[in-house]
Amino acid sequence: MMRRVSPLNSGFVLALLLNMVFRFEWAAAALILLILHFVLGWPLFPVWLCLAAWVLHSLLVTALLTAVTRSGGKEAPPLPNKNPYSKTNSDFTQK
């Protein structure tokens, strides 16, 4: 049974914030549209659309990468050492 990890402790929020920083051009476009709103009187809904697209795109990409990371297979069991020149555990015991 897998243990549950809260999103704050799993690094999801940090990854989301980092992803949003990498995709800052969406916020820059929203800032330009906000300036055009105050200067030329353009409507405010494109600003909100740009900000929503920025947050949703970052959220979806982060969620997808988190899901892919968590769906990894089981850890591979250790393989026996077949190197004839390496020391074994019995070589380290005192005689």
Image (cartoon, rainbow, N blue to C red):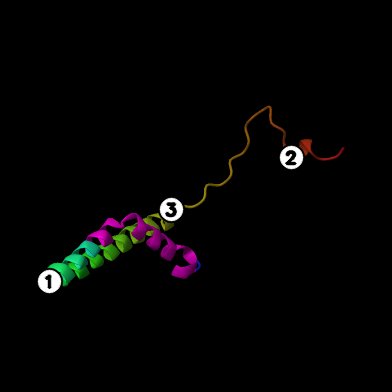
Q: CA distance from mark 2 to mark 1?
A: 78 Å
Q: Magenta residues: mostly which secondary structure? A: helix
Q: Residues within 10 Å of mark 2 (few under 14, many from 20)?
A: few
For label 1, count other residues whose C-alpha is less than 10 Å away and answer few (under 14), some (14-19) or many (20+): few
Residue at 62% x, 32% y is 82
> Label 3 amino acid?
Gly
Residue 6 colored in magenta in the image? yes
* Distance in Å between CA atoms under marks 3 and 1: 51 Å
Which residue reaches farthest top? 85
- The answer to whether mark 2 and mark 1 are in CB contact below 8 A is no
User: Is residue 5 something that shows in the picture?
Assistant: no
Tell me the magenta residue range.
Answer: 4-29
Q: State which tag comes first along the sequence, 2 or 1.
A: 1
Residue 53 lies, in percent from the top left, at 23, 64
The structure residue drawn at horizontal position 44% and vertical position 62%, both measured from the top left corner, is: 14
Q: Identify the secondary structure beneath mark 2.
A: helix
Q: Say if the magenta span includes residue 17.
A: yes
Where is mark 2, residue-wise? Answer: 89
- Residue name at image x 42 percent, y 65 percent: 13
Image coordinates for residue 15, horizontal then vertical, percent: 41, 60
Q: Label 3: which residue? A: 72
Look at label 1 and name its amino acid.
Answer: Gly
Label 3 to label 2: alpha-carbon separation: 32 Å
Taking depth in this image into account, of 69 and 40 the one nearest to the observer is 40
Disc 3 is placed on an element classified as loop
Q: Is residue 59 left or right of residue 81?
A: left
Q: Nearer the viewer, residue 10 or 37?
A: 37
Instruction: Report which residue position mark 1 lands on.
Output: 41
